[in-house]
Structure formats: C-alpha cells, structure tokens
Image (cartoon, rainbow, N blue to C red):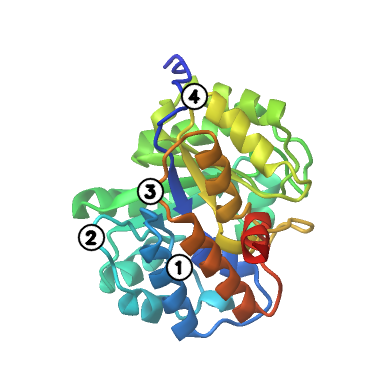
Amino acid sequence: MNAPLPAPARDGDFVRIVEVGPRDGLQNEKTLVATADKVELIDRLSRTGLLSIEATSFVSPKWVPQLADAAEVFAAIDRRPGTAYPVLVPNEKGYERAREVGVQEVAVFTAASEAFNQKNINAGIDESIERFRPVLERAAADGVKVRGYVSTVLGCPYQGAVPVADVVRVAKTLHALGCYEISLGDTIGVGTPHQASTMLKAVAGEVPLPALAVHFHDTYGQALANILACLEDGVRVVDSAVSGAGGCPYAKGASGNVASEDVVYLLHGLGMRTGVDLPALAETGRWLAGRLGRETGSRVGKALAAT
C-alpha cells in the first residue's frame, strides 16, 4: 500500500488544468456545434496556454451524436508542441479510429457504481474494464499514453451512495493496467469538501497522489470548494470545462462541469501557477457561450466582461 503523500505548500505550486470542454462539455449540449466551431474552440484554448485539452470522443455517434465528427475535428486542429490533445475511446475500435488521425493520448472510462455502468454502457464494472483492456495493451505497444476516468465517485443517480472502497478498487485497477493518470469524477455533483477529501485520501492510499486528478460537476455549487479541499490534500491536476459547458448525458440532474475560468481564478488567487492566460480563457468562454446561444456559465467570465 502506498501511503498518501503529504500536501505540499501551495504558493508557487503548478497545477495542470485538463480542459474537457470540447469533449465532456459539448457532448451534453443541446445545441449542435459545427465542426469548424469545434476546431476554432480547441485552437483558441491552445492559445491560452493550457497544456492538456481533451479534444473529442471516438465513441459511436449513436451514443453521442454531438461528437460524430471526431476524426474531422482532430485532423483539423492546430496541435501545438507541448500541448496534449487526449481523446476518449470506449473500446479497441474507437482506439483504431483515433490512431488513424494521429492521436497520441487516449482516455478510457468506467464508473465506481455498478448501476451507473449498466445504465451507461450496458455492462458491469469488470466487463467494462475487459472491453478496454486491449486498448491499454495496444497503447503500451504503440507508445500512446492512456488516462483513466472513474465516474460516480461521490454518488450515483441510480444507486445513491457509492462506497469509497469501490472507488479505490476501480482506480487501483486502472492504474495497475497502465493508466498514467486517474481522474476521479463526481458525475452528478453531489459531493461536499469533506466527502471529496475523504475519498481522495482513500484512493491515494493505493494509487500515488501525483497520478490522481479531480473532476467535479457543480450541481450543488460545491465544485470549487471540493477542488480547494483536494488541493489542500496535495492534488495537482484538475479537470474543468471552459464556460462551465456540458455535463453527463447519462446522469439525470447533472449540471455542467466547473468552469475553467473560475478554477484558474481560484488557483491564481492561491498563488499557484497554471500557465493559463485568464483573460484569453474568459474571452474563449464568452465566445463559446455565444455559439451555444446562452450566457457564459463562468462567474469570472461575467465579472471580467463587466469591468
């Protein structure tokens, strides 16, 4: 068992933002976004200094029609040196499609809730892992990095509470299979800071803390507080979506992701580094909101626009 690492000092620490707006954000938006706009969104995000931008998802268009143009989008974006552009793949077929357009990093996903997995992908946790085991094997041979997502870590819309032990087991399994990083997702945004911290510490007892990321939805307005609690525990990778876009199409009641602009403002206020140009990020959020036909979901974006 790996003992949890002590939380390092915050001032000057670097936090890597994993921008999930182009994938996890757009997949749950009702407005169909044009391929050219998706490409422009990713290129705008690249210019803000973000180092990791989840570009799209190579899942079946039947599952997520909003991202049916995955190959076209990835082939057209301006991939900047030093920036990673991971994509989501559900299985070996999705991996093959991604590799055909030059993808160098993929992400696989499962849940800590059996009920959620059954509703989401019609498979149990162990079966879902078996489905993408060939992806991890091929990625290792191809030199492709693999990120792992564990959803419903703080609650499930179908079974309610999710035992922390289940979260630990799934995260440990993904890490052992070769995922370099495990993103722990509060899919329906029900968690509170104490719950988030308790869960993170439990997982960090089995998976090295530097290999863990957090991914909070803001259904009950707790996302920033949860992130702060996990920062205090030493986590240094945070998922977020520009303009607070999206959510989960399979989780009833889940609101959007925490807004990247709000997260960056929090981090900079703590004296932490992100390498992100906040005004440029906020402008990108306002641009996206305009394309989606709504106001930006970022409090910081609204505040900056008013000054």
Location of residue 237 with respect to 25 vertically, above or below: above
Inter-mark Cα distance, 3 to 4: 26 Å
Inter-mark Cα distance, 1 to 4: 29 Å
- Neighbour class for label 2 at 10 Å: few (<14), some, many (≥20)? few
- Seen in the image, is 39 located left or right of residue 26? left
Q: What amino acid is at disc 1?
A: Thr
Inter-mark Cα distance, 2 to 1: 19 Å
* Residue 243 or residue 54, whichever sits in front: 243
SS for callout 2: loop
Inter-mark Cα distance, 3 to 1: 23 Å
| Image point (60%, 37%), residue name | 227
Judging by the rendered image, the residue that carries numbered circle 2 is: 81
Placement of the C terminus among the 4 image quadrants: bottom right
Q: Count up the numbered dots.
A: 4
Location of residue 100 with respect to 205 vertically, above or below: below
> Of label 2 and label 3, which has the lower sequence position?
2
Judging by the rendered image, the residue that carries numbered circle 4 is: 204
> Of label 3 and label 4, which has the lower sequence position?
4
SS for callout 1: strand
Judging by the rendered image, the residue that carries numbered circle 3 is: 275
- Neighbour class for label 3 at 10 Å: few (<14), some, many (≥20)? some
> Of label 3 and label 1, which has the lower sequence position?
1
SS for callout 4: helix
Label 2 near label 4: C-beta < 8 Å? no
Q: Quadrant of residue 244?
A: bottom right
Foreground: disc 2 or disc 1: 2
Judging by the rendered image, the residue that carries numbered circle 1 is: 56
> Of label 2 and label 1, which has the lower sequence position?
1
Q: What amino acid is at disc 4?
A: Ala
Label 1 near label 3: C-beta < 8 Å? no
Is residue 113 in view from this perspective?
no
SS for callout 3: loop
